[in-house]
Image: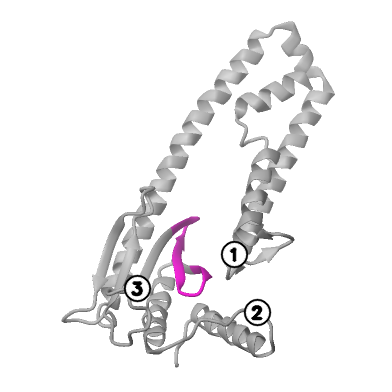
Amino acid sequence: MKDRHPLIAKWVAEHARARDAFLHGKGDFPWGMDKQDYRKHRILSSVFFAVEKHGVLPGSRGYLEFHFEHQGTSTGALLVPLDGDRHNPHAKLRFIILDSINTNSTIYAEWVDGELSLEDRVPEIVAGILAATRAVARAQREHLKSLLDKEHLLILDGLKRLEQLGGDSFAARCDPRTFQALIEMAERHRSASLARRFLRSLSRSIADGSVIVAGHSLDDWMTWATAKLDEFDPLVQGPGYVFDKLVKA
């Protein structure tokens, strides 16, 4: 296949490695690729290349599982046979963009083979993906702004409470240990932010989250690491936690 998108090429290479390992007595029998798969590859390659020109990046955690990333947000999508027959080479295909703003994973938009094939409707699909990802990013910005506004009010309230502590507050602010505690919490937050970026990159490189390492799946390890980072990052605990630590330092 010409003009294969790198993500599609990665899927094909992973399949080839799995097949080779199986032939050498290792691993399970890999999924097969048929005409329906190759048609999906062609459609998705066209879509992936097109959205990338607009700053939207395709991502995946496994074969034929894909989503679209834009400004730190993720929008899910599906390309499935309309009749549910995974192996029917003549099955009509259905391209779905999921509504990633709502938590119930409803459909944002969809296209089905008809008078026009999905190949002919790629420009429509791309426009839909761009609209959906931008809407998700906009909603995320508004959500974060709301959180920041709340955090700002809590910080101001915390400063007022420190002022009201009178002599104790003055002693705390003058104590070098208080400033050192502030620096240490800032360093923890910076380290946590760096680790989160690393986890996001690591997540994009995981082809199969069900792979077991040391008795746990990769998805479980990612969940554990995220929870540990939240515990480690003082900013996640909120301004009340931060000021309480400063006063008690």
Residue matched to label 2: 27
Q: Nearer the viewer, mark 2 or mark 1?
A: 2
Crowding around mark 2 (Cα neighbors within 10 Å: few <14, some 14 to 19, many 20+) is few
Magenta stretch: includes residue 8: no
User: Horizontal and vertical percent for residue 95?
Assistant: 31, 71
From what the image shows, is residue 249 above or below residue 7?
above
Q: Is residue 197 visible?
A: no
Q: Residues within 10 Å of mark 3 (few under 14, many from 20)?
A: some
**CB contact under 8 Å: marks 1 and 3:** no
| Amino acid on which the number 3 mark rests in the picture | Val
Instruction: Say which residue label 1 marks.
Output: 210
Image coordinates of residue 216 in percent, x first then y, are 68, 58
Using the numbered discs, state the Cα–Cα distance from disc 2 to disc 1 in whole angstroms: 14 Å
Question: For mark 3, what is the residue?
Answer: 80
Indicate whether 153 appears above or below 42: above
Q: Is residue 123 above or below residue 239?
A: below
State the extent of the magenta-drawn residues as a range.
59-74
Q: Is 89 situated left or right of 156 in this image?
A: left
The Cα–Cα distance between marks 1 and 3, rounded to whole angstroms, is 22 Å
